[in-house]
Amino acid sequence: MLDIVKFFHDNDLPFTVNIYPFLSLYLNQHFPVEYAFFDGNGQTIPDNGKNYDNVFDANYDTLVYALNKAGIKDMKIIVGEVGWPTDGHKYATPKLAEKFYAGLMKRLAKDVGTPLRPEKLEVYLFGLLDEDMKSILPGPFERHWGIFRYDGTPKFMLDFTGQGRKIVPVAAKGVQYLDKQWCVVNKDTINLDEVGPDLDYACYHGDCTAMLYGSTCSNLDKIQNISYAFNMFFQIQGQDVRACDFRGSAMITKNNASVGSCLFPIQIVSGSGDFRISYVFGRFIVAGLILLGLVTAI
């Protein structure tokens, strides 16, 4: 690794690092929440005469320290990715993402660096749009890093200038959607004792990450959970009528099936198609719902 770094340095190439304060919370339940943000409300940690009140600076300067120790003190550093997800975990919410980005933008607008590198930082945000086909092996939140939803709708207020204005990013224009229809449970025909395989199938071929604990759709009841899974499969399959059957347990409705802040999406015209996620993770989603008592065990 050191040889690679020295090669980069000798050829005037930067060291690129990704910093994700969210992961500090996700991976350690005892991590102080406020230390992931830039408000200065967390406990300040002194280190060799330098004070740190957020994990971004601490992570950045950990790299600076390592480079200094290796004798490479003037190597340029770029933060290639930094962001906050909005779904798939209790800390992955639009509210916390808005808080994180607001602090980050204000910080960058001041053109100040870290305690060890006080000069202006070069930082790139991650990401612009949600990625509905991204691997979720690292965690259910992996598809939800976008500042915008899948259709270009902004998720929260964000002032890219860092002035702290309460403004919303401009949404995508000219987006075309499929018909305003949803696939939901047919309460007259569904057998809750036998729906397990259908739910499993829908989550295998769709995206049920928003249904997990702490996510935007984690407050649904059993019927609503199943409807959400059915609809995700239906939309991803381009609203094919054959994708809303599930052995007679589902039906198509023109009534918006969304529940509170839980969006039952409608697919965009160019976004439908055959979509697969790990079968193992599909089973994991269903297992989690069973443990929460939101569906009946198979």
Image (cartoon, helix red, strand yellow):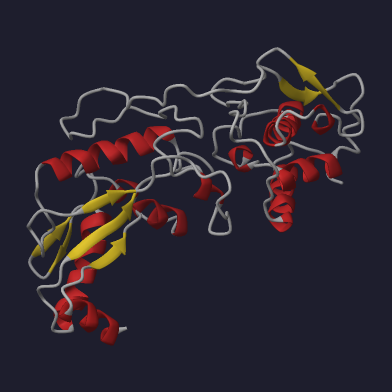
Tell me where residue 188 appears, x and y as whole percent.
90, 19
Seen in the picture, residue 276 relative to 28 is either above or below; the reply is above
Q: Quadrant of residue 220?
A: top right
Q: Quadrant of residue 109?
A: top left
Toward the top, the furthest residue is 255
Tell me where residue 80 appears, x and y as whole percent.
30, 57
Which residue is pictured at 85% across the width and 22% down the height?
A: 186
Q: Quadrant of residue 241?
A: top right
Please indicate whether residue 166 sits to the left or right of residue 276 in the image: left
Please indicate whether residue 117 sits to the left or right of residue 22 in the image: left
Toward the bottom, the furthest residue is 3
Tell me where residue 45 appears, x and y as whole percent.
19, 60
Report the label total. Answer: 0
Along the viewing direction, whichever of 75 and 261 lies nearer the viewer: 75
Please indicate whether residue 138 sits to the left or right of residue 204 in the image: left
Along the viewing direction, whichever of 5 and 138 lies nearer the viewer: 5
Which residue is pictured at 74% across the width and 52% down the height?
A: 283
Which quadrant, please, contains the N terminus? Answer: bottom left
Seen in the picture, residue 103 relative to 70 is either above or below; the reply is above
Seen in the picture, residue 178 relative to 199 is either above or below; the reply is above
Which residue is pictured at 59% across the width and 33% down the height?
A: 270
Tell me where residue 112 appears, x and y as whole percent.
9, 50
Along the viewing direction, whichever of 267 and 135 lies nearer the viewer: 267
